[in-house]
Image: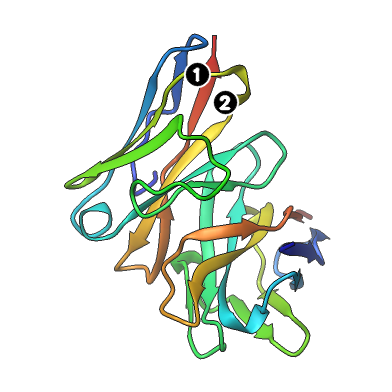
């Protein structure tokens, strides 16, 4: 059971907009910034969004992040087949002195 | 370009030890904190340990405290994870990852990851 709660799956048709949620608490998301990672099967994760809503260079602006209180969201607009992957939210956990990850959301492009 | 290459994985019996290495290149290794993150087969990501850029601090997830030890050799640009008293539940792909903060407090934005190395604990 992850400290951060994500839906196990999400789906959308090509061109649609999909949102993935990440719910935490005051001791993690509520007091720290959120990062999102994208992972394709058999590969290592890639930093997709950092500091709640910032995109590393090279990440398309179709990907956006937001945060409100103890929850965060990742939005993917103009969904493409190559977006099919697992997505993880993560944030610092004060009690751990390290990051905690959500359980991950498997995105399927219909 | 930044490269992180893990090695040292394999099959080990419960209770035994294993040491993972992560060779870094393409950046000034001594300027960055480093993490180990693992992923059990078919499961999600789980943070394991972190070391500060200068090795001055280390933190661990609860279930590996007292069994695992993270260290680094900045002269060799290499990160290590010494794993003792291994258990079946430690079976996972282990990734090393760079913290994006330069010479500062760890912020756990993991901007570069290795390809991962499989550790299987089984009799």
Q: Is residue A67 above or below residue B19?
A: above
Q: Are marks 2 and 1 in contact (CB under 8 Å)?
A: yes
Decide which of B69, B97 is in the foreground and name it.
B97
Q: Say which quarter of the image contains residue A94.
A: bottom left
Q: Position of residue B106 (x, y in %)?
A: 44, 73
Q: Position of residue A50 (x, y in %)?
A: 42, 52
Q: Residue at x 28, y 60 (%)?
A: A32
Picture disc at residue A104: none
Chain holding disc 2: A
Q: How many marks?
A: 2
Picture disc at residue A79: 1
Q: Residue at x 25, y 44 (%)?
A: A67
Q: Is residue B94 above or below residue B62?
A: above
Q: Say which quarter of the image contains residue A86.
A: top right
B23 lies left or right of B32: right
Residues indicated by labels 2 and 1 sit on the same polypeptide chain: yes
Q: Residue at x 56, y 87 (%)?
A: B55
Q: CA distance from mark 2 to mark 1?
A: 7 Å
Q: Is residue A61 above or below residue B87?
A: above
Q: Position of residue B59 (x, y in %)?
A: 47, 76
Which residue corresponds to mark 2? A83
Chain holding disc 1: A
Decide which of B51, A84 is in the foreground and name it.
A84
Decide which of B43, A51 is in the foreground and name it.
A51
Q: Position of residue A109 (x, y in %)?
A: 54, 15
Decide which of A44, B9 is in the foreground and name it.
A44
Quadrant in the picture for the N terminus of chain B: bottom right
Q: Residues within 10 Å of mark 2 (few under 14, many from 20)?
A: some
Q: Residue at x 41, y 78 (%)?
A: B105
Q: Is residue B100 above or below residue A14?
A: below
């Amino acid at each position: 059971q992850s400290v951060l709660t994500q839906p196990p799956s999400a789906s959308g048709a090509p061109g649609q907009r999909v949102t993935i949620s990440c719910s935490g608490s005051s001791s993690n998301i509520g007091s720290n910034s959120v990062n999102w990672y994208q992972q394709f099967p058999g590969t290592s994760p890639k930093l997709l969004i950092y500091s709640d809503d910032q995109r590393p260079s090279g990440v398309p602006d179709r990907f956006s992040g937001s945060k409100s209180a103890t929850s965060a969201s990742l939005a993917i607009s103009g969904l493409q087949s190559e977006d099919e992957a697992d997505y993880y939210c993560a944030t610092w956990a004060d009690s751990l002195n390290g990051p905690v990850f959500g359980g991950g959301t498997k995105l399927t492009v219909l | 370009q930044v490269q992180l290459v893990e090695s040292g994985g394999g099959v080990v019996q419960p209770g035994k030890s294993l040491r993972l290495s992560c060779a870094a290149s393409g950046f000034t290794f001594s300027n960055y904190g480093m993490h180990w993150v693992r992923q059990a087969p078919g499961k999600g990501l789980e943070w394991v340990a972190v070391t500060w850029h200068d090795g001055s601090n280390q933190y661990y997830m609860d279930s590996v405290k007292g069994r695992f030890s993270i260290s680094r050799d900045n002269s060799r640009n290499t990160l290590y994870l010494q794993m003792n008293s291994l258990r079946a539940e430690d079976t996972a792909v282990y990734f090393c990852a760079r913290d994006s903060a330069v010479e500062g407090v760890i912020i756990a934005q993991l901007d570069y990851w290795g390809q991962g190395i499989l550790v299987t604990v089984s009799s």
